[in-house]
Image (cartoon, rainbow, N blue to C red):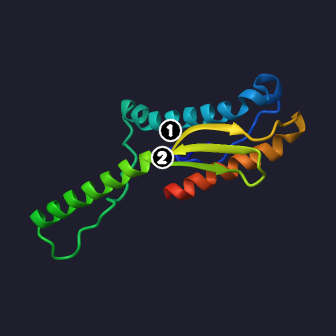
Amino acid sequence: MVDALGRFVDLSLHPSWWSALGPGRVAAGLLEALESARMKAALVPMILRRHGYAPLPEREPAHARPEGESDLRAQIADAYRLIDDAGKRLRERETLRVVDGPRGLFRLHLRGGRIERAELLARPVPGDTDRLVADAREALAELAKVRGEL
Protein backbone atom coordinates (compact mmCIF):
# COMPACT_ATOMS: atom_id res chain seq x y z
CA MET A 1 0.00 0.00 0.00
CA VAL A 2 1.24 3.49 -0.86
CA ASP A 3 -0.21 6.96 -0.35
CA ALA A 4 -1.38 9.28 -3.13
CA LEU A 5 2.23 10.33 -3.81
CA GLY A 6 3.50 6.74 -4.07
CA ARG A 7 5.20 6.68 -0.66
CA PHE A 8 5.28 3.36 1.17
CA VAL A 9 2.54 2.98 3.80
CA ASP A 10 2.15 -0.72 4.56
CA LEU A 11 2.30 -4.22 3.10
CA SER A 12 0.75 -7.60 3.63
CA LEU A 13 0.97 -11.10 2.21
CA HIS A 14 -2.02 -13.09 1.04
CA PRO A 15 -2.33 -16.34 3.01
CA SER A 16 -1.61 -18.35 -0.17
CA TRP A 17 1.78 -16.68 -0.74
CA TRP A 18 3.66 -19.88 0.02
CA SER A 19 2.04 -21.83 -2.80
CA ALA A 20 1.89 -18.87 -5.21
CA LEU A 21 5.44 -17.56 -4.74
CA GLY A 22 7.32 -19.79 -2.37
CA PRO A 23 10.32 -18.60 -0.41
CA GLY A 24 12.40 -18.10 -3.54
CA ARG A 25 10.16 -15.43 -5.09
CA VAL A 26 8.50 -13.73 -2.13
CA ALA A 27 11.07 -10.91 -1.79
CA ALA A 28 10.84 -10.05 -5.50
CA GLY A 29 7.06 -10.38 -5.30
CA LEU A 30 6.87 -7.81 -2.50
CA LEU A 31 8.93 -5.35 -4.53
CA GLU A 32 6.78 -6.01 -7.60
CA ALA A 33 3.64 -5.28 -5.58
CA LEU A 34 5.18 -2.06 -4.23
CA GLU A 35 6.12 -0.89 -7.72
CA SER A 36 2.65 -1.76 -9.02
CA ALA A 37 1.03 0.25 -6.22
CA ARG A 38 3.30 3.21 -7.01
CA MET A 39 2.38 3.08 -10.70
CA LYS A 40 -1.32 2.99 -9.84
CA ALA A 41 -0.89 6.00 -7.54
CA ALA A 42 0.85 7.87 -10.38
CA LEU A 43 -2.01 7.07 -12.77
CA VAL A 44 -4.79 8.39 -10.53
CA PRO A 45 -4.20 12.13 -11.25
CA MET A 46 -4.15 11.45 -15.01
CA ILE A 47 -7.39 9.47 -14.84
CA LEU A 48 -9.04 12.18 -12.75
CA ARG A 49 -8.00 14.89 -15.24
CA ARG A 50 -9.29 12.81 -18.15
CA HIS A 51 -12.71 12.64 -16.50
CA GLY A 52 -12.83 16.35 -15.74
CA TYR A 53 -11.85 16.36 -12.09
CA ALA A 54 -9.47 18.99 -10.79
CA PRO A 55 -5.90 17.74 -10.29
CA LEU A 56 -4.66 17.17 -6.77
CA PRO A 57 -3.09 20.30 -5.25
CA GLU A 58 0.63 20.58 -5.86
CA ARG A 59 3.06 20.47 -2.98
CA GLU A 60 4.67 23.59 -1.61
CA PRO A 61 7.94 24.55 -3.31
CA ALA A 62 10.94 23.01 -1.59
CA HIS A 63 12.70 26.38 -1.20
CA ALA A 64 10.74 29.40 -0.06
CA ARG A 65 12.03 32.79 -1.12
CA PRO A 66 13.49 34.90 1.68
CA GLU A 67 11.52 38.09 2.29
CA GLY A 68 12.71 41.09 0.27
CA GLU A 69 14.64 39.04 -2.31
CA SER A 70 14.20 40.35 -5.86
CA ASP A 71 12.79 38.13 -8.59
CA LEU A 72 16.13 37.96 -10.43
CA ARG A 73 18.08 37.18 -7.25
CA ALA A 74 15.46 34.58 -6.34
CA GLN A 75 15.82 32.93 -9.76
CA ILE A 76 19.60 32.85 -9.43
CA ALA A 77 19.37 31.48 -5.88
CA ASP A 78 16.88 28.84 -7.06
CA ALA A 79 19.22 27.86 -9.91
CA TYR A 80 22.12 27.41 -7.48
CA ARG A 81 19.92 25.33 -5.18
CA LEU A 82 18.85 23.14 -8.10
CA ILE A 83 22.48 22.62 -9.10
CA ASP A 84 23.42 21.72 -5.53
CA ASP A 85 20.45 19.33 -5.25
CA ALA A 86 21.33 17.68 -8.57
CA GLY A 87 24.91 17.14 -7.39
CA LYS A 88 23.66 15.55 -4.17
CA ARG A 89 21.31 13.27 -6.09
CA LEU A 90 24.09 12.19 -8.45
CA ARG A 91 26.35 11.31 -5.53
CA GLU A 92 23.46 9.54 -3.83
CA ARG A 93 22.79 7.41 -6.92
CA GLU A 94 26.29 6.00 -6.71
CA THR A 95 26.05 5.07 -3.01
CA LEU A 96 25.37 1.39 -2.39
CA ARG A 97 23.66 0.48 0.87
CA VAL A 98 21.90 -2.42 2.52
CA VAL A 99 18.89 -2.15 4.83
CA ASP A 100 18.04 -5.24 6.87
CA GLY A 101 14.81 -5.87 8.68
CA PRO A 102 15.31 -6.10 12.45
CA ARG A 103 14.34 -9.79 12.54
CA GLY A 104 17.06 -10.75 10.06
CA LEU A 105 14.66 -12.16 7.46
CA PHE A 106 14.44 -9.45 4.78
CA ARG A 107 17.15 -7.32 3.15
CA LEU A 108 16.94 -4.41 0.71
CA HIS A 109 19.85 -3.57 -1.61
CA LEU A 110 19.83 0.13 -2.47
CA ARG A 111 21.65 2.41 -4.85
CA GLY A 112 21.09 5.84 -3.44
CA GLY A 113 17.42 6.01 -2.54
CA ARG A 114 16.27 3.40 -5.07
CA ILE A 115 15.70 -0.26 -4.36
CA GLU A 116 17.80 -2.44 -6.65
CA ARG A 117 16.66 -5.77 -5.23
CA ALA A 118 15.42 -7.55 -2.13
CA GLU A 119 16.27 -10.90 -0.68
CA LEU A 120 15.42 -13.20 2.18
CA LEU A 121 18.23 -13.83 4.62
CA ALA A 122 16.71 -17.00 6.05
CA ARG A 123 14.50 -19.60 4.42
CA PRO A 124 11.01 -19.03 5.83
CA VAL A 125 8.38 -21.66 6.45
CA PRO A 126 4.65 -21.11 5.81
CA GLY A 127 4.16 -20.12 9.46
CA ASP A 128 6.65 -17.24 9.15
CA THR A 129 4.21 -15.00 7.29
CA ASP A 130 3.68 -12.49 10.11
CA ARG A 131 7.38 -12.30 10.98
CA LEU A 132 8.37 -11.92 7.31
CA VAL A 133 5.79 -9.18 6.70
CA ALA A 134 6.86 -7.33 9.85
CA ASP A 135 10.53 -7.52 8.84
CA ALA A 136 9.85 -6.32 5.27
CA ARG A 137 7.53 -3.58 6.55
CA GLU A 138 10.19 -2.24 8.93
CA ALA A 139 12.94 -2.37 6.28
CA LEU A 140 10.74 -0.42 3.83
CA ALA A 141 9.73 2.04 6.55
CA GLU A 142 13.42 2.59 7.36
CA LEU A 143 14.06 3.35 3.68
CA ALA A 144 11.17 5.83 3.69
CA LYS A 145 12.68 7.57 6.75
CA VAL A 146 16.05 7.83 5.03
CA ARG A 147 14.36 9.36 1.99
CA GLY A 148 12.44 11.76 4.21
CA GLU A 149 9.09 10.38 3.09
CA LEU A 150 7.51 9.74 6.49
Q: Dots 2 and 1: beta carbons under 8 Å?
A: yes
Q: Closer to the camera, 49 or 10?
A: 10
For the C terminus, which image quadrant? bottom right
- The residue that appears at 60% across and 48% down in the rendered structure is 98
> Gap between marks 2 and 1, in whole Å?
7 Å
The amino acid beneath tag 1 is: Ala
Which secondary structure, mark 2? loop
Quarter-of-image position of residue 24: top right
For the N terminus, which image quadrant? top right
Which secondary structure, mark 1? helix
Pointer 2 or 1: first along the chain: 2
- The residue that appears at 89% across and 38% down in the rendered structure is 127
Marker disc for residue 33: none
Q: From the image, tell me which residue sits under label 1.
A: 41
Q: Mark 2 Cα within 10 Å, few/some/many (few <14, many 20+)?
A: few
Q: From the image, tell me which residue sits under label 2.
A: 5
Q: Name the spot of residue 62 as percent of width and height, x first.
A: 34, 60
Q: Closer to the camera, 116 or 30?
A: 116
Q: Name the spot of residue 59 as percent of width and height, x first.
A: 37, 55
Horizontal arrangement in the rendering, residue 61 relative to residue 142 (left or right): left
Q: Is residue 16 shown above or below 93?
A: above
